[in-house]
Image (cartoon, rainbow, N blue to C red):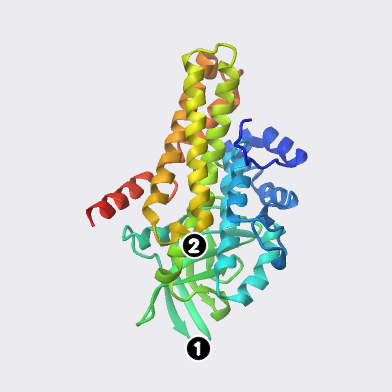
Amino acid sequence: MGGGEHATALQADLLAWLQASADALDTTPELASEIVPRLAGAGLFTIGVPASLGGTGGTTTDAIEAIAAVAEQSLAASFVFWGQRTFIEYLLQSPNEALRSRWLGPLMRGECAGATGLSNAMKFLSGIESLQITATPTDDGWQLDGALAWITNLRKEGFIAAAAVNSSGDLPPAVVAFISDRTGVARSSDLELMALRGSNTAAVKLDAVQIGADDVLHPNARAWLPGVRPSFLGLQCGMSIGLARASLGAAHALAGAARGPLLTQIEAEQAALEENVRALKAGVADGRFKTAAAPMFRLRIALAGNVAQAVMLELQASGGRAYLVDRDRNFARRWRESAFVPIITPSLTQLQAELHKHAAA
């Protein structure tokens, strides 16, 4: 399928597996346990991680392109990729070297799942939601109590998740990590999603979970989160980029022979998409989004618009056969996948409210 000029080429065996499994990953949890090991086996979790830390070098924008390449084949797999790679990004940006040295290797090798868990924190940062977990000091650390309603990549085989916590007393909210096998960590059954069913998405409850100082990603959430938000959102945008490229690529192939007005529309949308991709990568690369969130929010909204346009153009290029299940299952899957793009946290509604506040200020 399509792809911009910087598109990542996936290894042939991974590509074949994603193409064969995309429907199952979307509609059932049966292959959920395979995603992390397969992405790790192809070396995808090492992209954008410095060689000095065991990665293959490159930058966050290279990781965005890798997530986009997976999203062209399966949004469920790219959703898991985003969760894992975003947790790796937290470790790279954390001042806690002990935590980084303990977990970076296992996460890059896919031996453990990393769950970002900071959707609630990003909403908290924008004043949309209060923090759902409380940390109470103990003799040798903290006790965590609370719940997170929706986290992806909570592998049943084991995971480490990040969460922002309210500290009791005068301490600022912090960002901590907790592990699935700690006493008091309870994962719900998978959420009943209408798509992306292979993404190990569930709720988690914390009941008197004990953590120590070596489990703290950052002691001050308000100070740290704006700096990691560009990576969190940029990597997330990889999902939209890949899905839009896939739909536009399919639409182009279907409309190509006709050379009519529809093809002109498709090519214009492809150009608009890649212009947004260039702007996103430039802002992530030079760090400007760390201090200016509004332009990044606008790009996330624009990319969601590219996805909506892309699946509509694919439908128009396909005509009635898109509605025939035996003709093209990819379109039906992409249509379902596209319904997730506007609501993934931060949702388009939340981002628009933020921009409205920003404009008023």
Q: Residue furthest left?
A: 360
Check disc 2: other Cα within 10 Å, few if <14, some if 14-19, many if 20+: some
Secondary structure at badge 1 equals: loop
Q: Earlier in the sequence, mark 1 or mark 2?
A: 1
Q: Report the residue at 48% width, 26% height from top.
A: 268
Question: In which quadrant of the rendered image does the N terminus lie?
Answer: top right
Examine the rendered structure and indicate whether residue 55 appears above or below residue 214: above
Question: In which quadrant of the rendered image does the C terminus lie?
Answer: bottom left
Residue 110 falls in which quadrant of the image? bottom right
Q: Report the residue at 58% width, 49% height from top.
A: 64
Examine the rendered structure and indicate whether residue 162 appears above or below residue 6: below
Q: Nearer the viewer, residue 274 or 233?
A: 274
User: Can residue 346 be seen?
Assistant: no
The percent coordinates of residue 244 (x first, y second) are 52, 34
The percent coordinates of residue 359 (x first, y second) are 26, 52
Label 2, on which residue? 228
Foreground: disc 1 or disc 2: 2
Q: Residue furthest bottom?
A: 139
Q: Is residue 61 left or right of residue 358?
A: right
Check disc 1: other Cα within 10 Å, few if <14, some if 14-19, many if 20+: few
Q: Nearer the viewer, residue 263 or 156?
A: 263
Distance from Cα at disc 1 to Cα at disc 2:
30 Å
- Which numbered dot is residue 139? 1
* Amino acid on which the number 1 mark rests in the picture: Asp
Secondary structure at badge 2 equals: helix
Q: Report the residue at 71% width, 41% height from top.
A: 10
- Which numbered dot is residue 319? none
Residue 125 falls in which quadrant of the image? bottom left
* Amino acid on which the number 2 mark rests in the picture: Val
